[in-house]
Image: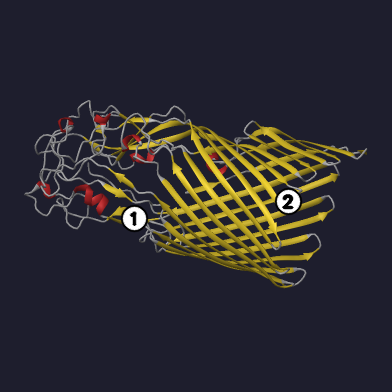
Amino acid sequence: MRRLILLLMALGLVLTCSQAWAEDEKSYELEVNLGASVNDYGDVPNRAAEYKSQVDMDSSWYIGGKFSLAEKDFLLNLEGRYIEVNDQEYSGSLDFRRLFSFKSNYYRFYHRLDRDLMENLQATATEYRGGTWYPEKYTSTFTPPSSMPDVKDIDNDGVWEGASAAVWHDSYEKVHHYGVTRSLWKNDAILRLPTVPGVVLGFTHRMEERKGWDQARTVSKCSSCHVAAYSKYIEEYTNDYIPYIEARLGRWTVRYSLMYRSFNTSSDVPRHLYLNAQGPAPTTDPAAALKPDFGLAPGEFPGEGGLNYDYSDGELPFARTPESEKWQHTLKAKWDISSSQILNLGFVYSEATNESSDEAEGGSGLLYGDAGEELEVDYLAFSGNWHWRLRKDMSLTVKAKYHTMDGDDVYIQLDPYYNPADPTIDGKDFSFNRKSAYDEDEYIFSADLSWRYSRELAFRFGYELEYIDRKNAEEHHVTDETTEHLFKLGATWKPMAGLKVKADYNFLYVDDPYAFKHAACPEEAIGTSVGGTDYTPVNSNPDNPWNYSWYSYTVYGRRHADTTNQPEMAHDLGVKVDYILSANLNTNFYLKYRYAENEDDTDGYNWEQNTFMGGVNVTYTPMEKFGVNVGYNFFWDEYTSMLCAAVYHG
């Protein structure tokens, strides 16, 4: 996959006028900014301009300004900018005698979301023309009944597609361009008590609103995988309420905060009519009468199988976003050991609760989202940070952190499994207790050394170790332990007045990155009923049709490749140059390059990624209240990997 931005250009023209005067200890200042913006993005704007509301040679005016007022014991500051309705930002603050202060910030922007066209889901589809099916064992003429919605003659050529398709899809979408408008509003109030010096009381409120459209997808299991897509309206609200207290006690500064977060949603809950279970399933299945005759008793299909829900259950909800709440306790302490040493300590404990996991949506039980209880995830963390100025030109910072997470288990109630051909499992209950994937312990240690070699040259050295132990990894088929090593080098050079060059290099090595075990690429069948190296079902006894392993083995059980999008090694290189040419002209230039790969943790199916970005910006200020900024930025990303698709044979 290759993505290339051909042009990302912004032209800003700032006109500033201000006036300030002093009279009776009063001071006012006003600044007005006017400008224009032109934007164009090549290829896919959802990727190249994910957080830009304007694309395709859009242009708009830029309007902004500042206002400040200082009168005796009262200070007021207001600031804002407006480009268009989904790109605006405002802030304000006031202070009264440093006893009470208040700050407020509001930000609104647009987030573009992808739409999956699902065209790849027909890549491995085959056509069923009647005639023979596995000619070495069965012959049958297939006439699909109208009650089988996964079988269609899509091109009106008399050929029914989908009967033996690997995958299929349908789109019920009413919106084709997806995106969400996000509004963030944060307020912070502080009260200092004159009767208790060093004690500060504060309260923070943060509100986030998300409105827009997103794509929701679900999958049926019929004769193949059948994916359906719907348009889902998003309307979500998150509110944080954070009271806190801070006290300075000699060389110690202690801060405690309590956060309560509520997440509420009025988003759509799409509903889908899942397809008929066309096998594998025995004649005892109520839907057997709707299935074709594959050479055995009507409706029977050799092998194991059973579905928890299908067409007979009617429309079922999916893609429901649960409401939740979270309580979090945070304690921070700072110790000024000496003029050259500082120690910071931290403690966090939180409980997050799913408030919708004990509520059903249009029915009862797990199929409608009711797990029987409100599920909870607990989080506990300790952290420390020690900064030591070893000498005038050298300092060392050491950090350590430990956290653990614990999530509730969920009991999954399944229908009994019927297969009269195998009495050992016929009628067996496969219900189980699903352990939480959140359960883990994580340890982090890092050390950074800064050394100013001379007035012109400074160096930075760093190392970070991270170890993760996932408690229920085997049950979820993921990596159980991951160890990361990050090495950092950096330098800052100031060869002359006005010129600064900064360079950084990071090397990341990961031992056993997070991966999904046995997720792709089935092995070739050792011996098949049709011969050759194929993925058709293995049959060691042709006289016994129930001896076929079928796709429960040849597609699921026989997959051997682990998949991951996490690198085993990564190199990051960055260079930035700032140059002040004169009192009214300055420029900066930057380059960033990243190379990442994974060769040993994907069972030979390697991948690599190359990312490059660069840009230049020039600012010219011919007069005190007038400035022009011109910039150009370039981004290029290439990802190379093998695509492995598992093909079903009916």
| 187 left or right, relative to 356 | right
Q: Give the amino acid at mark 1.
A: His
Residue 614 shown left or right of residue 512 in the figure:
right
Q: Mark 2 points at which residue?
A: 196
Of residue 643 and residue 227, the one placed in the foreground of this image is: 227
Q: Which residue bears the numbered disc 1?
A: 477
Q: Where is residue 35 in the image (x, y as percent from the top left)?
A: 75, 36
Q: Assess disc 1: are there few (<14), some (14-19) or many (≥20) residues with their C-alpha within 10 Å of its C-alpha.
A: some
Give amino acid for label 2: Val
Snapshot quadrant of residue 198:
bottom right
Instruction: Residue 154: give x, y in percent of width and height.
Output: 30, 29
Q: How is the structure coloured here?
A: secondary structure
The x, y position of residue 443, in whole percent, is 49, 63
Rendering coords of residue 136 (x, y %): 11, 46
Left or right for 285, reference 188: left
Residue 562, compared with residue 201, is above or below; it is below
